[in-house]
Amino acid sequence: MIRIGAILMVFAAVLLSAATPLSAGTSPSKIRLQSCVLFVAGEGNIDSIAAMLKVRFVNESEQTLKRIVWRSQTPTGTIDIADSGTFSPGISVYRHPLYKGKAWKTGRFALEIMGPGVCTVMQTEAADGEVWKASGITAAASIDIPSPPPDSATPVPATFDNPDHNPIGIISCRFSLYWGRGAHGTVRFRNLSPRPIDSITFRGLFGDAGIDVVKHGIFTPGAFVNSGDMVRHELPANVYQEYETLDSPASCVAVSAHYVDGTVWQNPSVSPTEPPFPAGVP
């Protein structure tokens, strides 16, 4: 289980006082991002959302910094998280700022995968009080975490004649990667085709990366299936953190399905090879 303290959202409106000397924000912040991971949990509103940021970076300025405000992207909004410390020039720093709040232990997660594009620097404050602030700064956009749909959300069509149409009606899925314990995935779905299926390859989505697991069984047409815990012990390269996805249909995709009669459906919209995780510093 990931042990994460809840973090309150820190919006741009409560950043450093305008009375502090600011630079115009037209020059780079001189923070070189190496990797960035954002965890978000909650019920979907500002009073219940919590988050944790894991970020690796190098301060390439000539000043020691004491505060950095990060803005992270999620599929449905943005979140600003401030971190205070001593960030010396030229040193690779690994931080995971935490802010305790009431939103933890909701049992639902959203994730943005490790990668420099996940977060940007909105503001820095040097040890001598000098502040750099990104130009055009706006308030963080509200994050929406949707509720998992009911089992009846995916209808079963009367006929299924289009071979390119996805025969797997995903209702919701949730994937996690635990360092040392492999990948785990749970998918709720229906077989929307008129033929029984005996194996399905699902891909948990982690930003631009993905990890595939295979579910075997006999899945009859129209039947609702809860896959239970699907485990893959071997993790792909460059997996350095523990990741969770939102319990949502958007958290995974069906890559292929093998029918009992021996035919195979291959999803034309995704690569048959799982996309790699970005290289980073372990």
Image (cartoon, helix red, strand yellow):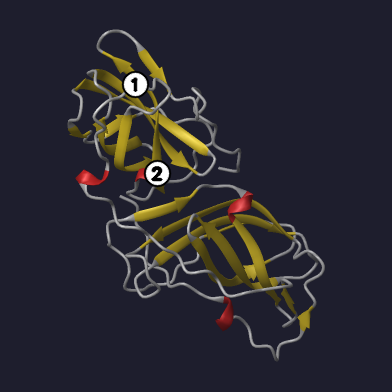
- Most extreme residue toward the top is 262
| Quadrant of residue 166 within the rendered picture | top left
Which amino acid type corresponds to the residue marked 1 in the rendered image?
A: Asp
Q: Is residue 101 left or right of residue 158?
A: right
The answer to whether 117 is drawn above or below residue 27 in the figure is above
Which amino acid type corresponds to the residue marked 2 in the rendered image?
A: Ser
Q: Nearer the viewer, residue 24 or 5?
A: 24
Which element is circle 2 on? helix
Q: Is residue 201 left or right of residue 120?
A: left
Residue 58 in the image: state x and y as whole percent: 69, 57
Residue 15 in the image: state x and y as whole percent: 60, 80
The answer to whether 234 is drawn above or below residue 74 in the figure is above
Which residue shows up at 28% across the image and 24% down it?
A: 193
- Circle 1 residues within 10 Å: few <14, some 14–19, many ≥20: few
Q: Nearer the viewer, residue 265 or 35?
A: 265
Kindly indicate whether the residue at mark 2 contacts the one at mark 1 (C-beta within 8 angstroms).
Answer: no
Q: Earlier in the sequence, mark 1 or mark 2?
A: 1
Residue 165 in the image: state x and y as whole percent: 40, 27
| Quadrant of residue 215 within the rendered picture | top left
Q: Which mark is residue 161?
A: 1
Q: Nearer the viewer, residue 226 or 6?
A: 226
For marks 1 and 2, give the one nearer the viewer: 1
- Circle 2 residues within 10 Å: few <14, some 14–19, many ≥20: many
The answer to whether 50 is drawn above or below residue 109 in the figure is below
Q: Is residue 143 visible?
A: yes
Which residue shows up at 34% across the image and 52% down it?
A: 2
Q: Is residue 92 visible?
A: no
The answer to whether 213 is drawn above or below residue 239 in the figure is above
- Tell me the CA gap for discs 1 and 2: 27 Å
Q: Which mark is residue 251?
A: 2
Q: Which mark is residue 232?
A: none
